[in-house]
Amino acid sequence: MKLDLPISGYALIGDCHSAALVSRGGSIDWCCLPRFDADSCFGRLLDAQSGGHFSIAPVGAYETRREYVGDSLVLATTFESSAGAVRLTDFFAMRRGGRQDPRRELVRTLEGLRGVMRLRVEFVPRFDYGEIEPWIYRVGATGPMDPTGHCAVGSNAGLLLSGDVPMVPDGAHGLCAEVELCEGQRLRLAMRFVSPEELHAGPLVLPLSDEIDAHRGETLAWWREWASKIVYDGQPGVGVVRSAIVLKAMTYAPTGAIIAAPTTSLPEHVGGERNWDYRFSWIRDSVFTAQTLVHLGCSAEADAFRRFIQRASAGNGEQLQVLYGIDGKRRLTEITLGHLPGWRGSRPVRIGNAAEHHYQADMFGLLLELSGRWSERGNQPDDAYWQFLVETVDCAIDNWQRPDRGIWEVRGEPRHFVHSKVMCWAAVQRGIEMATRHGLPAPMARWSAARDAMRSVIETHGIDPKRGNFVAAFDSVDLDAALLLLPEVGFVAYDDPRMLRTTQAIRHELDGGGLILRYNAADGLSGGEGSFLACSFWLVECLARQGQTEDARKLFERVSRCANDLGLFAEEYACASSESLGNFPQGLSHLAHISAALALGRS
């Protein structure tokens, strides 16, 4: 098969614990088990030769079409040739009660649709990001009717592969099979993660064929039940439900954490250094995701994240950091994996993220925004949670005059970013509103004075005196697409003349070939990047709310065409080469897509 496939060529499957990317050609080229942030067991996405894969594809020439089965994350890929047609179905098995007791089972089934087709199956796991070739041995078959399978083990990971495909050794560290599938015939493979404790405990239980088939029905029912909660009255065909399903797939069910993306080090520029690990829970992305799902009627995820961040910060506003591990871990040391060549030679490949050390002032406002929206839905914080919020507001007041790394986590010198200052203002404003709404104790005089002082400074130093638009950082003329978010927190109205001028300046000066770039200032890194899809959708929302509906709709359609055939968005898009860039799929792009669609619907 062709290696280093386009980023947009992949599909996502997952179970709210882990995820995998499946190519159009039926190859699982990225999978981390048993959690989103675990070491990869299939990593061909970042190492085309030695990263490992699990592929099922026809022998010879064929054509492909694929789709998700209804409102689910069950992927159906149809292979067709002159000789026959076969459907490959891929999914992670879901079930009721799986939040704390997941199956951790990836299922692949083959169904003959027409004629006869020959297919090759390759199971080539590589643990620890491709560094470990596993020991593979046969298991099962204690009786004549028992299923058989193989176990691949190495380091602290194990994979149990079973089913009715006759797998045989392919060298010392892989398995393969070639099978002919006739019309009406079905074959199954189930791959389950097994822990060292399970391997030590005794014989492993292999599922029967009818059990594997039943898991498909359970999984479809689970996703359909979740998707049925979505409330959306907008135009059909814009992919809002699909985007919501992607966001749900990026929640880590045991804790309520929400990851930014299920991949690491897919580049923002091919061959460049802007390659980051996104398999963690950023306050920014997670709050945006939670609030977006609330708009669609899915409030449980928002409340779960609210509780997660309180736990992760030890209930102390002063101990907040901008991102956490999906279990709440704080230490996420950034490491370069020198043995990995990266997607299309984009190095370095990184795991962990040094942004754990960044001071980003927007986190205070984001948390108070999330809590404020929760409060507006009729909820009142208890004493412990209110104390946490009071400390967070006080931290915003104590720190708002410090320069920070900003929403984009620049690796250059900290600056007085206007968006960051406004989010500190928002933290105080939401605190005042909640205290007033619920009659809660708070230093209202101090808070009100600080809020007013913040606004005065922002309006003095955060606006270009010549052009009358907001700027990226104090006393600069740079632009930042994050300024499009200022009306969302109530700092300025969408139709305020300053905001109208800001929107038009961003629209024209951050244009990246029909889409929007994040900013136009140096950020401490070499090379460029693609247009940022979330920012482009933010512009859609601003235009829609400013009454420029036709322009908003045209831009929405333009940005929406950057999704792949399954409705999945990457982080960025290279307009010149028409290709997706950055980690994939990207939660921020999907949530901004939903918000823009909702804004268009209201307009």
Image (tube, rainbow, N blue to C red):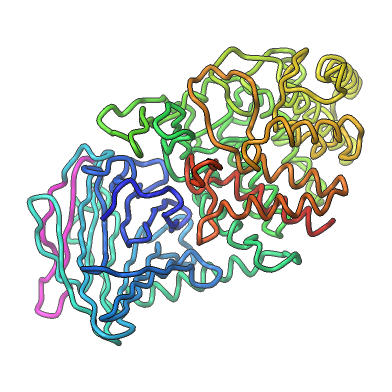
Does 59 appear in magenta? Answer: no
The residue lying toward the viewer, choosing from 396 and 562, is: 562
Which quadrant holds residue 47? top left
Q: Which residue is drawn at 42% across and 38% down?
A: 266
Quadrant for the N terminus in the image: bottom left
Where residue 123 sits in the image (x, y, percent)? 21, 57
Residue 486, horizontal then vertical, whole percent: 79, 33
Q: In this view, does 200 lie to the left or right of 253?
A: left
Front position in the image: 98 or 218: 218
Residue at 72% x, 41% y: name it: 370
Q: Tell me which residue sits at (66%, 62%) in the image.
A: 238
Q: Give the range drawn in magenta.
A: 134-155
Q: Position of residue 135 (x, y in %)?
A: 12, 48
Viewer-nearest residue: 273 or 455: 273
- Give residue 133's quadrant in the image: top left
Question: Total of numbered circles in the picture?
Answer: 0
Q: Is residue 592 above or below residue 478?
A: below
Residue 512, quarter of picture: top right
Asked if the stretch drawn in magenta spans residue 142, the answer is yes
x then y, percent, for residue 411? 53, 19
Quadrant that contains the C terminus = bottom right
> Can residue 466 be seen here?
yes
